[in-house]
């Protein structure tokens, strides 16, 4: 799930939605440097120094933005790994639950079959006993 709240993008990082990661939108306008270097007077040291300072500032800003982007990529990668582990754990738990249900039903079916066979054996014994008594009485 991805929502936008002003300058912060929120990415849900857990299955229940309680953990989120906020990603800020960077303003690249401050990094822009006028690339019209043809108008720089290379004989004037102050103009060259000013231009070099602007270029250094722009490179530092760009490096900062790249570092922020890298850290947010790592955070999203970690969230993805955590969600993958959670999904695998839930699938394994569901499989174990289904296995237990199958074992329980198999045990109930075996018990029912044994009870039926026992009942039939007792009925057969009872029928044979009455026949033996009738033969003795003849």
Image: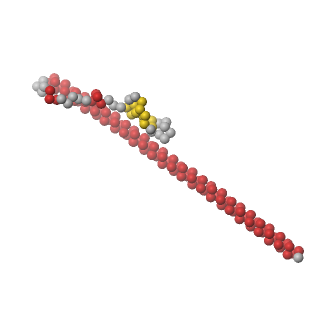
The quadrant of the rendering that contains the C terminus is bottom right
Extreme left residue here? 43
Left or right of 3: which side holds 122? right
Residue plotted at (53% across, 49% down): 93
Extreme right residue here? 137
Left or right of 60: which side holds 117? right
Residue plotted at (34% across, 38% down): 70
Percent position (x, y) of residue 92? Answer: 51, 50
Q: How is the image coloured?
A: secondary structure
Q: Quadrant of residue 49?
A: top left
Q: Quadrant of residue 137?
A: bottom right
Percent position (x, y) of residue 74? Answer: 37, 40
Left or right of 117: which side holds 69? left
Residue plotted at (74% across, 66% down): 120
Left or right of 70: which side holds 126? right
Q: How many numbered discs sit on the rendered protein?
A: 0
Percent position (x, y) of residue 14? Answer: 47, 40
Percent position (x, y) of residue 88? Answer: 48, 48
Residue plotted at (16% across, 24% down): 47
The quadrant of the rendering that contains the N terminus is top left
């Amino acid at each position: 799930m991805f929502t936008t709240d002003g300058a912060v993008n929120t990415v849900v990082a857990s299955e229940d939605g309680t953990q989120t990661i906020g990603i800020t939108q960077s303003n690249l306008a401050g990094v822009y440097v006028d690339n019209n270097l043809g108008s720089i007077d290379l004989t004037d040291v102050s103009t060259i120094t000013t231009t070099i300072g602007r270029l250094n500032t722009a490179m530092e800003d760009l490096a900062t933005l790249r570092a922020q982007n890298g850290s947010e990529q790592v955070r999203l990668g970690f969230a993805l790994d955590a969600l993958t582990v959670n999904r695998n754990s839930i699938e394994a738990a569901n499989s174990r639950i289904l296995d237990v249900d199958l074992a329980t039903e198999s045990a109930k079916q075996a018990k029912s079959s044994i009870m039926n066979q026992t009942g039939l054996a007792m009925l057969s014994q009872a029928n044979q006993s009455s026949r033996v008594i009738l033969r003795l009485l003849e």
